[in-house]
Amino acid sequence: MRLIFLSGLSGSGKSVALHMLEDLDFYCIDNIPAALLKPFISHTVRSSSTVYERTAIGIDARNPGDEIATVPMLATSATAPTKRIEFTGVRYLG
């Protein structure tokens, strides 16, 4: 399973990048609230569906600080006994 996080402010190109990844057969979610990441990741990791094998998530950097701070922890703590998970984080700093 491959999970890509894209974050940045409005206008930073997250949606454009997600559209490109969608064209490459990724399952994409744009502007998911950070508070919903944990249940979503739990669902994708436990799902037997191949739909989520390549997933990209756009997260607005304006999420509340305490919620956005949990993203790195979620990315490293999500595990499944039968799946290898590769996480990639992309952040626009411009």
Image: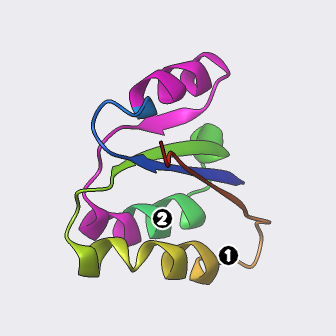
The residue located at (60%, 32%) in the rendering is 26
Q: Which residues are magenta?
A: 15-39
**Most common secondary structure along the magenta stretch:** helix
Residue 24's label in the rendered image is none
Residue 74 as seen in the image, left or right of residue 31? right
What whole-number distance in Å separates the C-alpha atoms at marks 2 and 1? 11 Å
Instruction: Confirm whether the magenta stretch covers residue 31.
Output: yes
In the rendering, at what x and y percent does residue 73 appear?
52, 82
Residue under label 2: 41
In the rendering, at what x and y percent does residue 1 appear?
72, 54
Residue under label 1: 80
Say what secondary structure mark 2 lies in: helix
The residue located at (25%, 69%) in the rendering is 35
Instruction: Confirm whether the magenta stretch covers residue 63.
Output: no
Question: Which of 19 and 63 lies nearest the eye of the viewer?
Answer: 63
Under mark 1, the amino acid is Ala
Counting residues from the start of the chain, the first of labels 2 and 1 encountered is 2
